[in-house]
Image (spheres, rainbow, N blue to C red):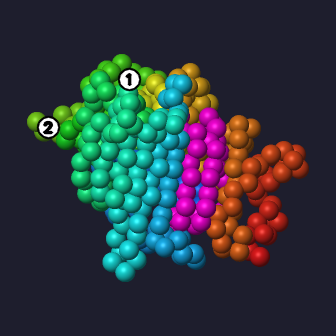
Amino acid sequence: MLTRVSICNYACFAEMELVLPRRLLLVGSNGSGKSSLWQVLVALQDVIVRGRDVAEVFPTRSLTRWQDHGGIQAFAIDVQCGADIYAYALELQHDPARLTASIHCEQLRRGEQLLYENRDGEVRIFGDEPRVDGLPHTTFPFGRKRSFLPDIEARPDNTHIMAFREALGDLWLIKHSPAQLAPTSAEEAAWLERDGSNFASWFRGVLADRPEVGSLLNEALRPTLPGLQRIAFEKISPKVRELMLHFRTDAHDYSVSADELSDGQRSLLLLHGLLVGAFNRRVVAFLDEPEIGLAPHEMQPWLAQATAALEQHDGQLFVISHHPAVIDYLAPERTIRFSRPGGGPTRIDEVTLETTGGASVSEWLSLPWVYEAEHE
């Protein structure tokens, strides 16, 4: 699980550090920095797991505009895997004139033990067992545009690096756009895109590994999709399959493609697909406004099931929301409010019963005076 995140010189974060609990609700005005936190984790996952160039995911325009750090931008995360705490740090050097970014220093530690370092274009890999002389097992030149972590192959002497990378791979960062959900799939997908657009291809891969998940999704959706009989992939060409939902009402059978569903129904399809297809193991789920298009009676049952599933597998859940039903369901765990007084850097405050004066968090957030400091 993620236990800490630190951000320096990124968008509205001048200097920010946040200790992360097992359950966290993030609230606040639009533009206060909630989604910027989500975006930082997206970018770090792209660098560490997917091998993208740092200049693509951390463009120079992402630097904090009102202060000068000499073009230095820094990020750090702590990840707990069993009894081990892995500390990852990334420091970038930006060239504002050329609008480029490169890795100045990248490190991965397990406790006090240095496992990996990429400094000024030289990679040093220390492995699981440190040498007596403290020197790395392997040293070689490498470009400063991307991390070498995605390229490291699993070996008996680098199990800790693999454990960290796999933990970052099990970070589900979802900000779905129902209208983008494609109904057809030409092949199985290894991961779900963050906007949910390739849900059909991802779920097709899930079914190939675990066919029983199809019936679990049917059962999960029936209370909110009356008349649903089954969900299936129908063959429309040798490679392409279309995600179809089959219904029965008043003794009549009919079928609809996934793209014929309403936006709210597509949200239900994706969220319940996540529940049965991904939350069956220890994962970290960070959902940015998952309630899109959903009514309270549709959202709350899913939240209860998702929370229970993640609890069962020691998972972690972060949610950004403006929805009263979501806010009041998750607020008793831990709630953080993001704000930007005077339009300056993001400030983070914990919301408690003392903060709200005993009112529910959603009720408190609806009061105009709560936001007065932001406009001073």
Amino acid of disc 2: Lys
Residue 171 within the magenta-colored segment of the rendering: no
Q: Which residue lies furthest to the top in this view?
A: 212
From what the image shows, is residue 270 above or below residue 195?
above
In the image, what residue occupies the spot 27% across and 40% down? 138
Quadrant into which the C terminus falls: bottom right
Q: Is residue 315 visible?
A: yes
In which image quadrant can residue 329 be found? top right
Residue 13 within the magenta-colored segment of the rendering: yes
In which image quadrant can residue 97 be found? bottom left
Q: How far apart are marks 1 and 2 (CA)?
A: 22 Å
Residue 18 vs residue 108, the one in the foreground: 108
- Stretch of the chain drawn in magenta: 1-30
Dominant SS of magenta comes to: strand
Residue 239 marker: 2
In the image, what residue occupies the spot 55% across and 61% down? 8
Question: Which residue is under mark 1?
Answer: 213
Determine whether, in the image, residue 55 is placed left or right of residue 240.
right
Residue 148 vs residue 166, the one in the foreground: 148
Crowd class of label 1 (few under 14; some 14 to 19; many from 20; radius 10 Å): some
Secondary structure beneath dot 2 equals: loop
Mark 2 or mark 1, which is nearer the start of the sequence?
A: 1
Q: Do the residues labelled 1 and 2 touch (CB within 8 Å)?
A: no
Secondary structure beneath dot 1 equals: helix
Count of marks overlaid on the render: 2
Residue 324 placement (x, y as % from top left)? 69, 48
